[in-house]
Amino acid sequence: MKNIINEMKLRLPAISVNESVCRSAISAFLAELDPTVEELGDIRLAVSEAVTNCIVHAYRDMPRGEVGNIYISVRLYNTREVSIEISDNGCGIENVEEAMRPMFTTGEGNERCGMGFLVMENFTDTLSVKSKVGRGTTVLMRKFLKQPEENVSDLISSSVKGEK
């Protein structure tokens, strides 16, 4: 049976410096599941894209000097599933299907390449995007971590005892 073993919630201002804060906080939180370097890199990249979307797009219509928030919820399950929900109360996305198409962007000129959702989709196992115009957007990403191989400390202990 799948059960939550740990949960973290963050609320941060949607400012660019907090993109790296989110990546770092989530990486540290995942440590108890001992993800591989590749799994951790995938999650960090997907989180970076989702948070950057909030910072760049969600609150673009706010009056100068005002900043909205990014809401993050991370759940770790006993099945080694990681669930990451990133949401905002921003402008929302009028057409999610269109926004998820590669190369689609609302950025001016060559400022954005429109690959954020594609990156999230390719570096997680499932991606769900829900949005309401004028209310905000929620991105839910799931990653299923591999079972860890033998624990390094068990290997060291076994070799010290002469076991194979």
Image (cartoon, helix red, strand yellow):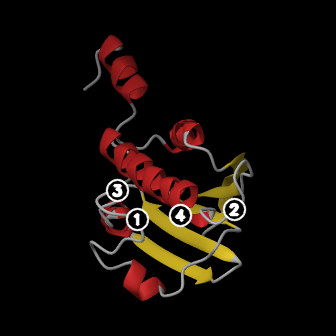
The picture places residue 73, in percent across and down from the top left corner, at 67, 58
Counting other residues with Cα less than 10 Å from the Cα at mark 3, is it few (<14), some (14-19), or many (20 or more)?
A: few
* Mark 2, residue position: 62
Q: Residue at x 42, y 44 (%)?
A: 35
Quarter in which the C terminus is drawn: top left
Say which label, 2 or 3, has the lower sequence index. 2
Distance between the alpha carbons at the discs numbered 2 and 4: 11 Å
**Drawn side of residue 125 relative to residue 82, left or right:** left
SS label for mark 3 = loop
Question: Eyeballing the image, is 66 above or below 37?
Answer: below
Name which of mark 4 and mark 1 comes first in the sequence: 4
The residue depicted at 59 percent of the width and 62 percent of the height is 60
Label 3, on which residue? 111
Is residue 79 in view from this perspective? no
SS under mark 2: loop
The residue to which callout 1 is attached is: 107
The quadrant in which residue 107 appears is bottom left
* Residue at point 31%, 65% (across, down): 115
Q: Report the residue marked by disc 4.
A: 57
Q: Are marks 2 and 1 in contact (CB under 8 Å)?
A: no
Measured Cα–Cα span from mark 3 to mark 4: 12 Å
